[in-house]
Amino acid sequence: MSIFHFISDFFSQSAHWHGYDGIPQRLWEHIQYSMLAMAVATGVALPVGLVTGHTGRGGNALALLATAGRALPSFGLLVLLFVIIGLGLLPVMIPLVVLAIPPILVTTNEAVRSVDPAPVDAARGMGMRPLRILAQVELPVALPLILSGLRSAAIQIVSTATIAAYVSFGGLGRYIVDGLYQRDYEQVVGGATLVAGLALATLGAFWLAGRLAVSPGVRHR
Amino acid sequence: MGIVTDSRIHGRRSRAAAALIAATAAVALLGACGSSGSGGDGNPLAPAKAAAGQVVVGSNNFAESILLADIYGEALKAKGLKVSYKPNIGSRETTYGLIKNGSLTVLPEYNGALLAYLDPKAVPTSADATDSAAAAKLDPALQLLRHAAAEDKDAVVVNQGTAAKYHLTADSSIADLASAAHELVLGGSPEFQTRQQGVLGLKSVYGLDFKSFKALDAGGALSEAALKKNDVQAADLFTTDFTIAKEKFITLKDPKNLFGFQNVVPLVRKDDLPQKGVDALNAVSAKLDTTTLLDLDTKVQADKKDPLDVATEWLKSVGLS
Amino acid sequence: MGEFFHVPSDLQHSYLGLVGWHLEEALIPVLAGLLLALPLAQLCVRLRWLYPPVLWVTTVLYAIPSLAFFVVLINWTGQSEITVMIPLTLYSLVVLVPAIVDGVRSVPEETHAAATAMGFGPVRRYLQVELPIAVPAIFAGLRVATVSSISLVSVGALIGNQGALGNLLADSMFYHRPILAVSSVVTTAVLAMAVDALLVLCRRLLTPWTPPARERGRGAPVSVPAVAEEAR
C-alpha cells in the first residue's frame, strides 16, 4: 500500500465526510483552535514587538523570553497542564500560544528596529508623534517581515494543534491519534494530508494578505 | 535577500563542486544513520527482534498492563531467565502484531478482550471456553497459558449526575441506557470506538446509539477526568480502577456479557519461552485473584509506589521470587 | 525533590540516562540535517531557480505534524529511535537550508571577487570564505533547529516509549503523579536552553571577528535573527 493509496481511500470513504467525526467538522475545529491561539499570541506579542522595536529597548529581555518560550516543549506542556489543571481548552491553548509568541515577537521587533532611520528622522522632523511614526512610517515599512513572522507562527500552530487530540479534543489530530491506537494508517495519512493542506492554505492566505496590505513602494521582491 | 553573487562566472566548476559536497554529505549521513541504528542495540527499548535466549516482556499503554508485565518478568527472572522489558507500547492492535512477529515473547493479556480481537462474533459462556476459543484463533507461534482468577473487565460507567438524571443504581444494567443513549456522550480509548467489545458491541448487543463518542485513553487519567467533569456522561473504565469507588461512579451491569470473561492471562511465544518459564507464569496465575490485582493497582496508582517494587514485593509474599 | 529525579522503573533509565538518550535522539538529527542542508543550500545558491520550489517543499514538510510522521514511519522502521529521528532530520533540514542560503548569499560581491582574484578555486572559496562568513546565519538556524528538535523528541513517547524524557509524561498520567510531568518539562526546557547557550558560545569562538558588543545594549538584534524565524 502506498501513501497515495491511503490518501485516496481515506478521502473516498463517505463516512469520513459527515457527522461529528467527519472531515468538515474536524477541519472546522482545527481552524477554531488555531485561530484562537493565533489571536491570543498576536495580541500579546505584536504590540510588545512593535513597541520594543520602536524604542530599541529590552532586546536582551526579549531574547531571553523568546529562547525560554521556544525551549518549552509543546507536548510536554500540554500533558503537564492537563495533570495540573485538568481537562479543558486551557491546557491546549497555552502550549500553542507559547509556541507562537517567539516568532511573532522576534520578527516584529527585528522588523521595526531595522527600519531605515532616515524616513523616521524625517517624520520626527515633520513633528509626528511617536505613535504616529510607528503607525504611519515604521509599520508599513516593517510589514513584510512582520507578516513573515506571523506566517511562521500560524504554520506552527496549525501543525501543532494536532496535539489537542491527545487530551480528548477534536481537530484534525483526532485522525492521527485514533489511527495510531486503532492501527489504521489510512486515517493517519488522511489526517496528516489535511493538516499539510491547511498549512498550505494558511501560506496562501498570508501571501494574499501581503499582496493586499503591503504598500507597493515597500514590496521588494 | 542580501547581495547576489554572480554564479554565471563560475558556472560549471562550482556546480561540480556542489555535487561533490552533496555526495560527501550524503555518504556521511548514511554513516551517521547506520551507526545510530546499530547504536540502538545497547538500548533495551530499541531492538526490533528479541535476541536469542532473551525473554522480552511487553505491555500495553495503561498502568495495570505495565504492572502485570513487571510481575511476569520478575517471576521469570527468579527462575534464572534473561528478561528485558518493552513497556507502554500501545494498544492491542499494535502489541498483538509485535508478539506475532517475534519482537515480544510474553504479553499480559485478558482472555475475553483477546478473543474479541481475534473473533468479534464469539460468545463464550465460561472463562475456560474463552481461553479455548481464543487459542483456536491464535497465530500458531503463540500460546495462551493458564489464566488467573483475577478479572479486569471493561465496564460502562456513569457519573453521579447521569445516574441521578436517569435513575441508575448499582443494580442497573447497560440495557437501561437504551432510551437515554442518544442524549449521552460516551468516552473511551480511541480503539474502543472500533472494537466489538466497545462501541460496535454496545450497538449490536444492547442497541445503544450514543450521541457521540469522545476518544480518551485506556481507562486512565483522561477517562476519569472527562467523566468527573461530565465531558462524557458514560465512559469505558476498568473494573479494577480505584477511582470508580473514589469518585462514586456507578458501574452498569453487563447481563448480555458483551465484555465477556476478562481473566488475566499470559500470551507467549511457544518456541521462545522454555518450560520453566511456562511453569513460572502458570504459578503466578494460580496466585493472582481480583482482590489482589485491585490492591496492587491501588498501590501503584494511588499510593504512588513503583510498579516494579510492587511486583517484587507481591511475588515475595506469595513465595514466587 | 527526590521525586523529581526519580524515574519509574518501567522507563528503564536513570534520570541522567534519559537526559543522555534525549540529547542523542535530538542532536543526531540536527547533525544529519546540517550535513544534508549544506550541499542542498549550495545548490540553491548556485541554481537560483531551485530555491523557491525547495522552500515550498520544505514548508509543506514542516507543516506535517511530527506524530503523523512517526506513526506512518512505524510501518518501515518500527517503534524505534530511528522512527523519531528521521522526521526530526527533515525538520532540521527545513530550518537550515534557508538559513544557510541567506548566509552564503550575504557574502559581499567584493569579498567574492577578491577571493577569486587571489586564485581561490570554488571549493576553497566555499570553505574558506563563504562558509565562515555564513557562520552566524548558520548558527542562527542551528539554534532554532536544535531547540525545536529537543522539544519534539518528547512526542516519541506516544509511539511506545521512544520519547526519552517525554516518556515521563505518559507515566505521569498512568500513575497520577504530576511531578513526573514537571520533571519532564523542566528538564527538557533547561536542556534546550543549555544547548542553545552552548551554540551561542561556539559561534563566538568560531567567529572571533564579530564583536560581542553586537549582542548587547540598545538596538541590539534579538537573539536569533529574524531570517531563521522566517525560515520555520
Image: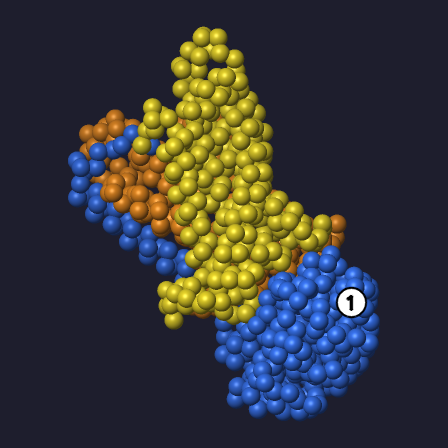
Chain colours: A yellow, B blue, C orange
Nearest the viewer among C54 and C137 is C54
Q: With respect to residue C44, does B278 lie above or below?
A: below
Q: Measured from the top left, where is residue C201 in percent x and y?
A: 50, 36
Q: Position of A221 compared to B145: left or right?
A: left
Q: With respect to residue B157, does C84 lie above or below?
A: above
Q: With respect to residue A125, does B146 lie above or below?
A: below
Q: Chain ID for label 1?
A: B
Q: Measured from the top left, where is residue C69 in percent x and y?
A: 46, 59
Say which element carries label 1. loop
Q: Quadrant of the N terminus of chain B?
A: top left
In the picture of the structure, the residue carrying the numbered disc 1 is B166
Nearest the viewer among B24 and A37 is A37
Residue at the image position 82 percent from the left and 71 percent from the top? B169
Viewer can see residue B54: no
Q: Measured from the top left, where is residue B172 in percent x and y?
A: 79, 75
Nearest the viewer among A82 and B34 is A82
Q: Measured from the top left, where is residue C70 in percent x and y?
A: 48, 61
Badge 1 amino acid: Tyr
Viewer can see residue A144: yes
Residue at the image position 42 percent from the left and 22 percent from the top? A115
Q: Position of B140 compared to C95: left or right?
A: right
Q: Position of B277 compared to C104: left or right?
A: right
Specify few, some or many for label 1: CA neighbours under 10 Å numbering under 14, 14-19, or 20 or more. few
Residue at the image position 51 percent from the left and 35 percent from the top? A104
Q: Position of C47 compared to B163: left or right?
A: left
Q: Quadrant of the C terminus of chain B?
A: bottom right
